[in-house]
Image: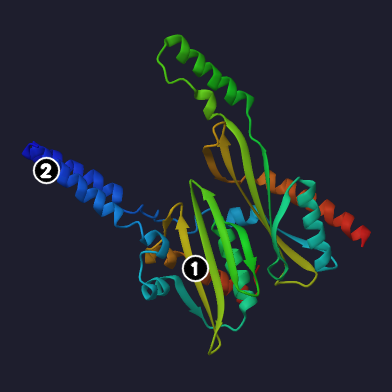
Amino acid sequence: MKRAAYMLLLIVCLGGCASTKVPADALRLPESTLDVRSIQTRTLETTSELNILIATIAVLQDMEFNIERMEKPLGVITASKITDADSIAEKTGLIFLDFLCVVSGSGGCGALSTAKDDQHITLTMVVLPSLAREGEYAVRITIQRVVYDKEDRIKVLDRIDEPEIYQAVFDNLRKSLFIQEGDS
Amino acid sequence: MSRLRQHWALLGLLIVGGCAATTPSNVIGAGTQLETRQIQTREYDTLDKAMTMRSVVATLQDLGFTIDQADAELGTITGTRLHKYTMRMTVTVVKKEGDQISVRTNARIGENPVTDAATYQDFFVVLDKAMFLTQHNVN
């Protein structure tokens, strides 16, 4: 019995010391890669590279982002913003859970503190001359977010994949490019 | 102290000592320099550093990263992926003698460095495809 207890303790402790295993698919392309790439990419026509870069920065400002980094030779623009992630439906559910907890007297109530509070969104746009045709530019966007709860704990780590979000950004970019071409 | 307590205390000390001994390596890193470089580096027969960097950016985007930092002159790109866990990668692109470009990458997942060769191999498989597409003028 004592020997079994020693072995169990040793296994638990060795497990604690061992480094975390890397997920096998950490750097493998998922099957959905082509679909995701087509959702995130558009080809736009314009007269100059400067026009599309100015229009891209302007559209990020339109969407209330701040520019974090820009590397023109690589066409990389990274922007971020912190926004509210509150959800009335979620909060109502958690308040109800807290209410049940208090009524039952089970203790450890505090479900509301796990409600989503704010989200940090990071967006990268890569704008490069098309390799296939002159006067065309390939624009690819990737967006991800960290959602924090009321106690500033990370609640969600998420890549944004919804096609309608990307479509809305590209619609705004087209408008921005139209305005920029009119101004230049 | 009973014999049983002595055994527990000794086991506890050994375990704590074993874990504590790894602390200094958190600054320097645990792997050997040569071995680490070997698994993290791939050389390509191309002269075009800009195209290689473009392929690296496309690879990182394909893998779901956003770009935190990029410097075309120094050939350095750092990206982060937020999906279930936080993964950060830095990729450096350096021109070598003999018409070759060297691409080196290192990755971390949360607090832990990625040290297994298979994960880097997976990255280079994706980069190989992106390099092929870029060299054949496909966006």
Instruction: Name the residue: 43% across, 66% down.
Output: B120
Residue bearing the label numbered 2: B7
- Tell whether A173 sits left or right of B106: right
> Quadrant of the rendered structure where residue A180 is?
bottom right
Q: Quadrant of the N terminus of chain A?
A: top left
Provide residue B105's location: percent of width, then percent of height.
Answer: 49, 68
> Dot 2 surroundings within 10 Å: few (below 14), some, or many (20 or more)?
few
Q: Position of residue A69 (x, y in %)?
A: 69, 59
Labels in figure, total: 2
* Residue for badge 1: B105
The amino acid type of the residue labelled 2 equals His
Q: Residue furthest right?
A: A183
Image point (46%, 58%), residue name: B108
Q: Chain of mark 1?
A: B
Residue lying at the far front of the rendered structure? B1
Mark 1: few/some/many CA within 10 Å (<14, 14-19, 20+): many
Residue that appears at 46% across and 9% down? A103
Residue A116 appears in the rendering: yes
Residue A43 screen position, x and y as percent:
74, 61
Q: Secondary structure at mark 1?
A: strand
Q: Is residue A115 left or right of residue A19?
A: right
Q: Give B64 or B37, whichever is nearer the viewer.
A: B37
Which comes sooner in the sequence, label 2 or label 1? Answer: 2
Q: Nearer the viewer, mark 2 or mark 1?
A: 2
Residue B96 x %, y %: 54, 84
What amino acid type should be assigned to the residue bearing mark 1? Thr
Quarter location, residue B79: bottom right
- Outermost residue on the bottom side: it is B98
